[in-house]
Amino acid sequence: MSTPEQNTDDIILSLENVSRYFGNIIALNDITLRLIRGEVHCLLGDNGAGKSTLIKTLAGVYQPSKGTYRVDGKPVHFTSPKDALDLGIATVYQDLALVPLLSVARNFFMGREPQKKLFGLLNVMDLETCATTARDKLAEMGINVRDPHQPIGTMSGGERQCLAIARAIHFGARVLILDEPTAALGVKQSFNVLKLIHKARAKGISVIFITHNVHHAYPIGDSFTLLNRGRSLGTFTKQTISKNEVLDMMAGGAEMQKMIGELEGATI
Ligand SMILES: Nc1ncnc2c1ncn2[C@@H]1O[C@H](COP(=O)(O)OP(=O)(O)O)[C@@H](O)[C@H]1O
Ligand SMILES: [Mg+2]
């Protein structure tokens, strides 16, 4: 959807007419999407709509087959997720990339553990600093960990989701992409994840929140893009669309209504 009145400096990343093909399959078809600095942008759509393909394109896992990907207004050509991370674009996938047997603290740092010198010579991981930093940073995000040395496998799904998000924020994400973070969670745990998204936005982080649950998306979202079979049905700000309209669009409600109208008008 073109928004000529939008100041381009306000756009942290954008896809302009991006398509992505897998052989004959058109996973994304001419998508234009603009993420405004500091907003929570919800990406909605049914299974197979192209949501994961879209975020993997943003994350540098896939390259667009057509179209332009811009970050801070400049075209980018990512060849790996590291290229995206280097620009502060962090993605939290559904499988989270956590190691169940490692401690909460080690999972928080994951290869970026602070070091200390043993006997003034050997560089070793400073596990105590890891533990206190992880505990403090998680507490700042409203996640209270009893013992940061405990294996992460002992945390609930919601807590793990929150840890993965808190980790991305701590390591300097400017853009946080969350693929269905509430899909496997109950009401209370989903609420904790939504609170964390709220906190991320308060820190000025721009968020892309993928979900097919409108009840999770609507309260927290500033804008909404609906995907349907690889195409965008447009981006709508919260001021311009009601929760029921989002619901309708997701359920194909408008299409259904039209078909029913045609049926009623027909003389059988
Ligand atoms: N690596 C791939 N190879 C072939 N087809 C794919 C691949 N990834 C996704 N697709 C196809 O692209 C379409 C969109 O998939 P996906 O992005 O996973 O949707 P969503 O995340 O919204 O469920 C589907 O038809 C899917 O089968
Ligand atoms: Mg998906």
Image (cartoon, grey):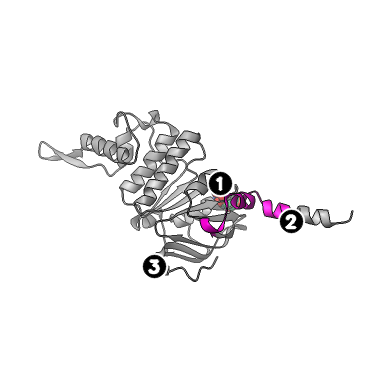
Secondary structure state at the residue bearing disc 1: helix
What whole-number distance in Å separates the C-alpha atoms at marks 1 and 2?
22 Å
Disc 2: residue Cβ within 8 A of ligand 1's nearest atom? no
- Tag 3 residue: 9
Within the magenta stretch, is there residue 46? Answer: no
Task: Indicate yes or no whether the magenta region holds residue 248.
Answer: yes
Q: Position of residue 245 (x, y in %)?
A: 61, 53
The residue under the point 37% across, 53% down is 205
Q: Amino acid at mark 1?
A: Val
Mark earlier in primary sequence (3, 1): 3
Q: Image point 40% across, 35% down: which residue?
A: 159
Q: Which residues are magenta?
A: 236-258
Residue 237 visible? The answer is no
Which mark sits nearer the N-terminus, 2 or 3? 3
Q: Is residue 14 left or right of residue 104?
A: right
Q: Residue 145 versus residue 223: which sits nearer the camera?
A: 223
Inter-mark Cα distance, 3 to 1: 29 Å
Q: How many marks?
A: 3
- The amino acid sitting under disc 3 is Asp
In this figure, which residue is indicated by the disc labeled 1? Answer: 214
Q: From the viewer's side, name the closer residue of 232 and 104.
A: 232
* Residue type at tag 2: Lys
Asked if the beta carbon under badge 3 is closer than 8 A to the nearest atom of ligand 1, the reply is: no
Q: Secondary structure at mark 3?
A: helix
Q: Nearer the viewer, residue 121 or 217?
A: 217
In the picture, measured across the screen, residue 213 lies left or right of residue 60, that is: right
